[in-house]
Amino acid sequence: MTYMTEERRLIQAQAREFAMKEVLPVANRLDPVQGEIPMELRAKMAAMGYFGIVIPEEYGGLGLGVFEYCLITEELSRAWMSVASIIARGNGLSAGRGMSEEQRRHYLPKMARGEYLGAGSISEPNAGSDVANISCRARRDGDSWVINGNKYWCTFADGADYIMLLARTSDPPDPKRRHLGISSFMIQKPRGELPKGCKGAPIPKIGYFGWKTWELAFDDCRIPADCLVGEEGRGFYYTSAGLERARAHTAARAIGLARGALEDAMAYAQTRVQFNQPIGEFQAIRFKIAKMATEIEAARQLMYFVCDEIDSKRRCDREAAMVKLFASEMAERVTSEGLQILGGAGYTKLHAMERHWRDARLTKIFEGTSEIQQRIISDSLLGKPAG
């Protein structure tokens, strides 16, 4: 099947030019000092329509598919993964799932314009891969909900205009069905601040710079009743429904990182001279580059297939898990090999290679660890374990 139409090639080329001209210089300047993605760059991204790629045209978006979303993501991630990630904060953090038509018409156009970006608050100190173990509580009190509990790994909690939070609103009727009773809330807040009744602190990270990742503590945080998204108790399902898209997006980020490592390694191998010749003339280096390129292309073609399945409305949870697993594992290997080609230079902040390497390691963790992806795949093939 030919996935790349002329229109898609133009979208890809435009995104590549934008990434290399606008994003890469900013990344090279700010990532080493852990600076944040500047508003000026966000405004340029908004002008390109990158915050509304998959938002329907009727709501002010580009009305494109997950395929185009991932094409653009790969290009942005080749320059800076954090920038490739922030576009998800506008492309409908929940993709409008559970929202009323009135809410969609109110919020989605602002998201598409990059004026209303969100942060997802799902994980907790004791609820990571085990999302159903959420203990943060939301209690109905008249015309309000009152939230109490702790959250973890909430990236962009300060810079966002709202936080999409999962909290427990009722106890599960069956201990084996702990996912029931979890609801989704859209907590609006001033940009640059945390919600009233919420305190937090940035988590020190080894990468994924450009924005902060927070631990949050909600203490009688009172929000209006209409902050509930969709039906009470359906939050787990709204979140799960977006996992195929999220995992394809992560695969695209991983592929972009790996491509950055490959391209940087190739450029270095052609200019670094040892033993009176460029190191790119040595078979050991050439074979590394050949393998790196092959692994990237294999991951990309699997991603194209998954994106096409999603856009065709065909279920592909197993294949989405496969591409997320394969691409993220590949990215760690490829960026590590790229660093090896640069040698000591790769272990410095004088080159972007160490950024590719650090960020690639994260792709094996977020949006479901590699181990979780393997469980999804094996359960699909063999059935769930009897235990």
Image (spheres, helix red, strand yellow):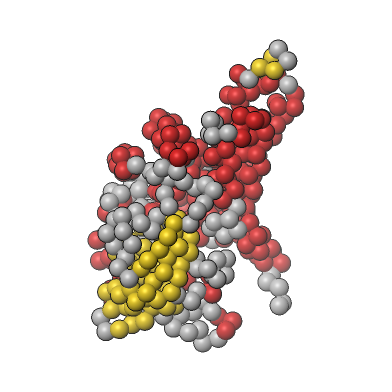
Q: Position of residue 361 (x, y in %)?
A: 59, 48
Residue at left offset 42%, top offset 31%: 25
Q: How many marks?
A: 0
Quadrant (top left/top right/bottom left/bottom right) for the C terminus: bottom right
Q: Is residue 177 visible?
A: yes
**Residue visible at 39% across and 44% down?**
36
Frontmost residue, 254 versus 223: 223
Residue 280, horizontal then vertical, whole percent: 67, 21
Pick the residue in front: 193 or 169.
193
Q: Position of residue 334 (x, y in %)?
A: 64, 39
Relative height, residue 329 to residue 119 (above, below): above
Q: Nearer the viewer, residue 222 or 347?
A: 347
Counting from the top left corner in percent of width and height, residue 206 is at: 54, 48
Q: Quadrant of residue 169?
A: bottom left
Kindly indicate the quadrant of the structure image that contains residue 145.
bottom left
Q: Quadrant of the N terminus?
A: top right
Check the image and name the residue furthest to the top. Answer: 276
In terms of depth relative to the viewer, which is nearer, 296 or 277?
277
Residue at x 34%, y 42% (from the top left corner)? 38
Question: Residue farthest to the bottom?
Answer: 173
- Residue 10 visible? The answer is no
Q: Is residue 276 above or below residue 43?
A: above
The vertical placement of 162 against 360, above or below, is below
Figure quadrant of residue 49: top left
Residue occupying image coordinates x 63% and y 44%:
332
